[in-house]
Amino acid sequence: MSGYVDNKEDLSKRLRRAEGQVRGIQKMIENDTYCIDILTQVAAVTKALENVALSLLDDHLAHCVAEASEQGGPIAEEKLREASAAISRLVRS
């Protein structure tokens, strides 16, 4: 079972909202909207997606990593490496 199972509805809602924002940005470009206004909307979508990512990461740590840590051994080490790699990708983006 995924760690985010309790937050699926909230995550889906956030992603649908971000999807709508992206479509809005596309229309802004088609309508030759002022570039600074478009950049403001891009920043808003980026922040929304970062929030989704952080929520998923938090759920992963609280569920998957915590459960693996209780078991110990190679599974725990693997989950910690996965979490570390995910954090690294988020920080670089």
Image (cartoon, rainbow, N blue to C red):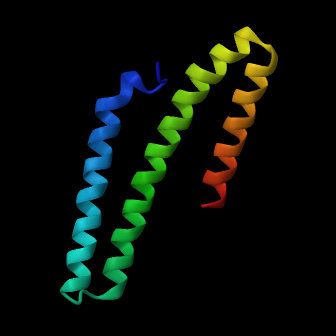
Give me the residue at 31% from left, 45% from top.
14
Give me the residue at 68% from left, 17% from top.
68
The relative height of residue 75 versus residue 80 in the rendered view (above or below) is: above
Residue 86 picture location, percent across and down: 64, 44
Instruction: Report the label total.
Output: 0
Residue placed furthest toward the right: 73
| Relative side of 72 to 44, left or right | right
Residue 54 picture location, percent across and down: 52, 42
Give me the residue at 44% from left, 61% from top.
46
Rendered image quadrant of residue 70: top right
Rendered image quadrant of residue 71: top right
| Relative side of 57 to 16, left or right | right
The relative height of residue 24 versus residue 30 in the rendered view (above or below) is: above
Rendered image quadrant of residue 13: top left
Give me the residue at 66% from left, 60% from top.
92
From the viewer's side, name the closer residue of 40 and 5: 5
The relative height of residue 83 versus residue 35 in the rendered view (above or below) is: above
From the viewer's side, name the closer residue of 36 and 3: 3
Residue placed furthest toward the front: 74
Please identify the quadrant where the C terminus is shown. Answer: bottom right
| Relative side of 12 to 67, left or right | left
| Relative side of 38 to 93, left or right | left
Residue 79 picture location, percent across and down: 69, 28
